[in-house]
Image (cartoon, coloured by chain):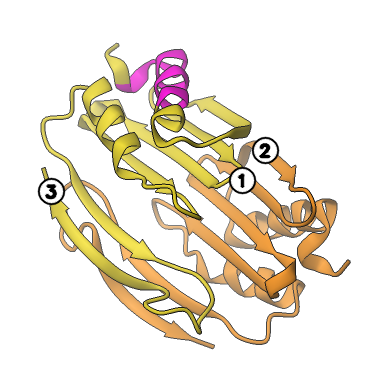
Chain colours: A orange, B yellow
Amino acid sequence: MGPLGDLEGLRSLMRRAAQAAGATVVGEAFHRYTPHGVTGVLLLEESHFSVHTWPEAAYAALDFYTCGALEPEPAARLVAQGVAAQRVSFLEVHRGLPEAEGALAMSRRGSW
Amino acid sequence: MGPLGDLEGLRSLMRRAAQAAGATVVGEAFHRYTPHGVTGVLLLEESHFSVHTWPEAAYAALDFYTCGALEPEPAARLVAQGVAAQRVSFLEVHRGLPEAEGALAMSRRGSW
């Protein structure tokens, strides 16, 4: 079935990603779609990580929403490696109060 | 405590938002922070909706991640109204396979 269809594998991978980012998990929900695909979210002290997979398209969409000093990139790299991603496109968005510098702006876009 | 600190109120509001969008809820996780703030996610057949609140700053960050024909805007408007938002800033991001037109691009930004 491959890593994108494996709910338990993805749950474990997302938890390791949270650990890699230094985040604290405070809740979670995962669901397997019929006929294929998995969706899941970890609630964190520092916001959330989510994953949605379309194994039939060899595609996964991930959000690494962090706050405070947490950097999402170590988590993203761990997950990409864990599912053997051949290509990663990312978009980094700064969000927060409208008064905050750069709030709700696309700050970085790229791929690796 | 106000709507941004009310976990059960936010859960109910997010569920009504899912209904307003025509989405099907397949899972959920909510958490109340100490001393204040709520975080929560609804897993949907069509991806997810999330909410994070900072009542002390009168601020909430919401994601309405939809796929297929679902439009997120009715859900966003319902939640904004439900928490009596005085200002809403939004950023719309198209995502999907890199081959897809406009994938991972910021398509619209604004406020109301």
Q: Mark 1 — residue?
A: A41
Hey, what amino acid is under mark 3? Ser
Q: Are marks 2 and 3 in contact (CB under 8 Å)?
A: no
Q: Quadrant of residue A37?
A: bottom right
Residue A16, image x, y percentages: 72, 58
Q: Which residue occupies 60% across, 30% down? A: B29
What secondary structure is marked by label 3? Answer: strand
Report how far apart the C-alphas of labels 2 and 3 lie in the structure: 31 Å
Residue B76 in the image: above or below residue B101: above
Q: Quick one: label 2, few (<14), some, or many (20+) residues within 10 Å? A: some
Per the image, label 2 sits on a secondary structure element best described as strand
Q: CA distance from mark 3 to mark 1?
A: 27 Å
Q: Are marks 3 and 1 on the same chain?
A: no
Quadrant for the C terminus of chain B in the image: top left
Considering only order in the chain, which callout, 2 or 1, is on the residue closer to the N terminus? 2
Q: Which amino acid type is shown beneath numbered disc 2?
A: Ala
Question: What is the magenta range?
Answer: B4-16
When the figure is inspected, residue B10 is found, relative to residue B99, above or below; the finding is above
| Whole-percent x, y for residue A30 in the image | 71, 42
Residue at image location 15% in from the left, 60% down from the top = A101
Chain to which mark 2 belongs: A
Disc number for residue A29: 2
